[in-house]
């Protein structure tokens, strides 16, 4: 990334503000922060990490990073935890110190900004609800921290375009979006094959993320009757950028089910499959998105339980995506080219020629190296990048392209229309 001049910055932020106006949301970009130098890190000292948000994902990240340090896969220590809920903080601290040792973790309740202000912390994992992602990432960059932010990168597209401007203004800043399937060898090999022309022009692709439940998706997040706003939980701060609403433990525990706080299947599940596919295809920006679906089984959930998306890209390619929380049988992940097709599955992939080219192209099986858990591999890549100042494996630019799909597909579902996106101006419009 290169530092933008004033004209580029004004164009990017104006586009973000303009798109927010289309959505009927207020968006005030403000000045782009310039990050200070990161905390010094000598060869032998651990990378010191803080965790913001100690729900299921945040606590999982904390335990995984501690295990990585204990096993010697990277020299890392989790030194701080922040959350608006005192009970969650205490539980996460106990689990983390069971791995790292007693007295190794400082807790920050209820304000995460105290953790960001710790000058000895090198990086932070942001595992807050989606409506906090953009603000927390920007504030972390302003404090000189490396960032690992849970997917989706932001809740809405204007926030993603804003982070793109922040990243361009701070090329030394390290921002990794937690979409771990970018580490799967099959997608990286597919990228190489496509770039070499092995399958000819890639014309369309398909992928999905489908699962099922009897009771309803995300209801496995339990509600603790001991939560008491004003006593051990700062509900006003949790509401944060979207404004305070009356306390609702259902929303606090299961916010992915609600339109105000999440894009549901699209942002929470489908980004896992869309992100590595966009990376492999390397086609540029989405230009047209249309989605359909509904509340077919889980009618109590505000977000949809069935989603089907059609995405067109500026590189002349169409992607078909299916998502469901009411049926677990999904689509095989396939990239279809004019001369051949690539079938992707975890570590491995198979390239098969189109019938017309069977005499010119041989079928190939690609076996990727077993590197273990992909999420751990992305965490370790991020830790190594903090130490070596190397680029992110899941950067902001990729996250912003994915957010075009997420945001426009969400709007298409609710508004019943196709949406277009202009990569030159970074503006979207209803078609």
Image: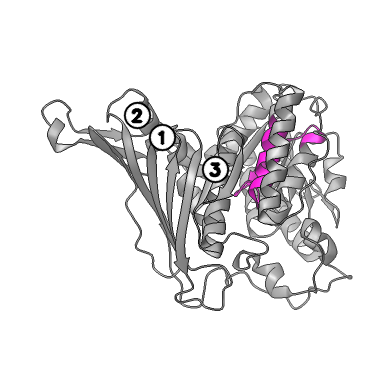
Q: Magenta part of the protein: which range? A: 141-167
Instruction: Please tell me which residue is depicted at 84% across the width and 71% down the height of the picture.
Output: 229
* Helix, strand or loop under label 3: strand
- In which quadrant of the rendered view does residue 70 lie? top right
Instruction: Please tell me which residue is depicted at 74% across the width and 75% down the height of the picture.
Output: 248
Residue 146 part of the magenta segment? yes
Disc marking residue 310: none
Crowd rating for badge 3 (residues with CA inside 10 Å; few <14, some 14–19, many 20+) = many
- In which quadrant of the rendered view does residue 424 lie? top right
Q: Which residue is mark 1?
A: 281
Instruction: Please tell me which residue is depicted at 19% across the width and 33% down the height of the picture.
Output: 363
Is any part of residue 210 visible from this angle? yes
Q: Is residue 192 above or below residue 20?
A: above
Q: Are marks 2 and 1 in contact (CB under 8 Å)?
A: yes
Structural distance between the alpha carbons of marks 2 and 3:
25 Å
Q: Is residue 417 left or right of residue 387?
A: left
Pick the front one: 30 or 190: 30
Image quadrant for the N terminus? top right
Is any part of residue 179 visible from this angle? no
Pick the front one: 82 or 241: 241
Camera-nearest label, 1 or 3: 3
Structural distance between the alpha carbons of marks 1 and 3:
18 Å
Camera-nearest label, 2 or 3: 3
Q: Is residue 101 left or right of residue 285?
A: right
Q: Is residue 72 left or right of residue 235?
A: left
Q: Which residue is mark 3?
A: 421
Of labels 1 and 3, earlier in sequence is 1
Relative image position of residue 49 (x, y in whole percent): 73, 40
Q: Which residue is mark 2?
A: 194
In the displayed orientation, state which residue is furthest to the left.
Answer: 359
Instruction: Please tell me which residue is depicted at 73% across the width and 29% down the height of the picture.
Output: 9
């Amino acid at each position: 990334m290169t530092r933008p001049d004033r004209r580029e910055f004004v164009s990017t932020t104006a586009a973000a503000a303009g798109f927010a106006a289309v959505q009927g949301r207020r968006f005030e970009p403000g000045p782009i922060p310039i990050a200070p130098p990161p905390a010094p890190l000598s060869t032998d000292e651990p990378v010191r990490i803080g965790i913001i948000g100690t729900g299921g994902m945040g606590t999982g990240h904390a335990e995984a990073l501690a295990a990585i340090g204990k096993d010697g896969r990277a020299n890392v220590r989790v030194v701080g935890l922040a959350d608006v809920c005192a009970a969650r903080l205490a539980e996460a601290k106990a689990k983390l110190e069971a791995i790292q040792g007693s007295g190794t973790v400082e807790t920050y309740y209820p304000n995460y900004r105290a953790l960001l202000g710790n000058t000895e912390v090198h990086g932070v994992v942001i595992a807050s609800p989606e409506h906090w992602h953009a603000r927390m990432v920007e504030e972390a960059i302003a404090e000189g921290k490396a960032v690992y932010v849970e997917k989706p990168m932001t809740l809405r597209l204007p926030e993603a375009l804003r982070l793109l401007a922040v990243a361009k203004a701070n090329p030394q800043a390290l921002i990794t979006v937690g979409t771990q399937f970018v580490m799967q060898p099959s997608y990286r090999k597919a990228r190489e094959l496509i770039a070499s022309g092995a399958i000819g022009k890639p014309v369309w692709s398909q992928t999905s993320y489908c699962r099922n439940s009897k009771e309803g998706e995300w209801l496995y997040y339990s509600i603790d009757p001991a939560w008491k706003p004003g006593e051990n939980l700062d509900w006003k701060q949790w509401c944060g950028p979207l404004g305070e609403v009356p306390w609702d433990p259902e929303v606090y525990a299961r916010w992915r089910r609600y339109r105000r706080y999440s894009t549901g299947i699209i942002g929470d599940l489908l980004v896992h499959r869309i992100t590595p596919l966009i990376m492999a295809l390397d086609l540029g920006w989405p230009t047209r998105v249309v989605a359909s679906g509904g509340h077919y089984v889980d009618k109590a959930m505000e977000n949809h339980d069935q989603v089907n998306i059609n995405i067109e890209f500026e590189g002349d390619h169409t992607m078909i995506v299916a998502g469901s929380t009411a049926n677990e049988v999904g689509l095989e992940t396939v990239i279809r080219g004019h001369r051949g097709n690539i079938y992707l599955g975890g570590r491995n992939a198979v390239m098969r020629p189109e019938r017309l080219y069977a005499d010119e192209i041989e079928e190939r099986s690609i076996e990727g190296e077993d590197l273990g858990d992909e999420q751990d591999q992305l965490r370790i890549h991020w830790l190594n990048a903090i130490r070596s100042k190397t680029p992110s494996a899941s950067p902001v630019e990729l996250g912003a392209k994915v957010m075009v799909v997420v945001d426009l597909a969400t709007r298409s579902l609710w508004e019943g229309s196709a949406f277009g996106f202009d990569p030159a101006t970074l503006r979207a419009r209803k078609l």
